[in-house]
Image (spheres, rainbow, N blue to C red):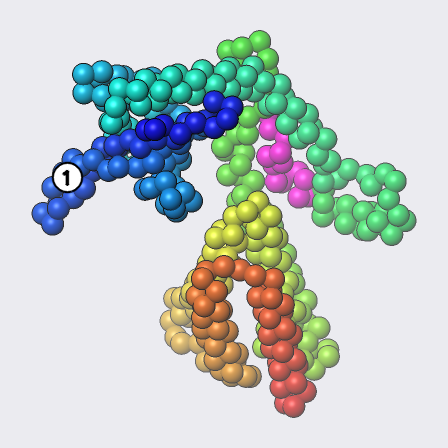
Amino acid sequence: SDIETDKFGTTISCFLWQRSIYYDKAGVDINAWQLRWFRFEQFNMSAVPDCVRSENHRISYPPFHGVDIDENHLLIKLQTLRSIPGGRPIVLLAPTRDVLDAVVVHCEKLMDFWSNMREDHDTNSDDNFMKKLDDLERVPLLISFPFGRSYFDILLYFCAFPLKLLIHLSVPDVRRSNICSSSSTSNYYYPSVYSAIFSILSSILWLMISCYAMVVSLEALGRLMNISDSTMGMTISAAGTSIPILVASQVAARQGLGNMAVSNAVGSNTFCILVGLGLPWNAYTTTYGTEYHGLVDEDITESIVLLVCVCLIFVSIIWASGWMLYRWHAYMFLVMYAAYILQVVTNNKGN
């Protein structure tokens, strides 16, 4: 038989020709027909190059809202809700009239199913949206009193309250957006673009202030404990300034955005090296009109060599793993960082 059907009659499989576009050496597109094994299920439509290797090179097609039929030439043209790669419609050629009729029947069933799904989504979208807004309303303010917490948490709250109050007043909370009236009878919460931009700039300003205070405090602490500035910078200061990067990468990784998490870590360090060093040096030489002569080695050369080696090891391991991240990668990087800290502290004691 030209058509395979499951025992429930809800799924059919058959061979169909699909019109494809190929390009010759001159870059001219050429229409051609590719024979594929199609599977029409209750919820979707997919195809593979042949029916033997059923899971190799499987293609799932987007939903379609219309079917144009050319019975004389046994052609089926699917009007998709979104275009397939290349922006062209899906055109199929049936080998027989029976196959054409069976495919058209299942295409109509698929369109009815997708239409009902869209109607249910439209009906429940407002309820789901308002539920998300209710969840956002439960987000506590930065200055909210920690009811039901330990005495230590309450003590920390009062100690940090002045700083929290300043941040609360200067950084808009985009989680609690302003009410914006819409054309409907309900009021919806939409984040303002300007408030979001102002919140980002304010957050960067507070990071700059906190980083400056931390660096000045670490310099004073290093002089009291007879620890070099480079050692303090490569250990405590580096860890402190990298906490925002750690938080941002952790949030991105939990959302499944692995590329963003890795790019955030790599891009931030590139920014620190190129801009964090280049901008102050440029400001100093422009202001005083001379070179800066106060730079002391203090094992900085060894740290730079280690940085290059660690970057090469990181890229090599990720490449050897097929650009996949595994748990043992994290353990290995943590051990390498602990060895780096031990090496820095040992050199400081030796000096």
Judging depth in this view, the residue of 302 and 71 nearest the camera is 71
Q: Residue furthest left?
A: 26
Residue 11 rendering spot, x and y as whole percentages = 45, 27
Residue 134 rendering spot, x and y as whole percentages = 68, 25
**Residue drawn 52% across the image and 48% down it:** 257
Q: Can residue 184 be seen?
A: yes
Q: Residue furthest top?
A: 185
- Whether 52 is among the magenta residues is no
The secondary structure type at the circle numbered 1 is strand
**Residue drawn 68% across the image and 78% down it:** 223
Judging depth in this view, the residue of 261 and 206 nearest the camera is 261
Amino acid type, label 1: Asp
Q: Which residue is mark 1?
A: 29
Residue 32 rendering spot, x and y as whole percentages = 17, 36
**Magenta highlight: main SS:** loop
Residue 105 image-quadrant placement: top left
Residue 170 image-quadrant placement: top right
In the rendered view, tell whether residue 287 sits above or below residue 155. Answer: below
Q: Is residue 283 left or right of residue 23?
A: right
In the rendered view, tell whether residue 156 sits above or below residue 1. Answer: below
Quadrant the C terminus occupies: bottom right
- Image: magenta residue range: 166-178
Residue 132 rendering spot, x and y as whole percentages = 63, 27
Q: Residue furthest right?
A: 151
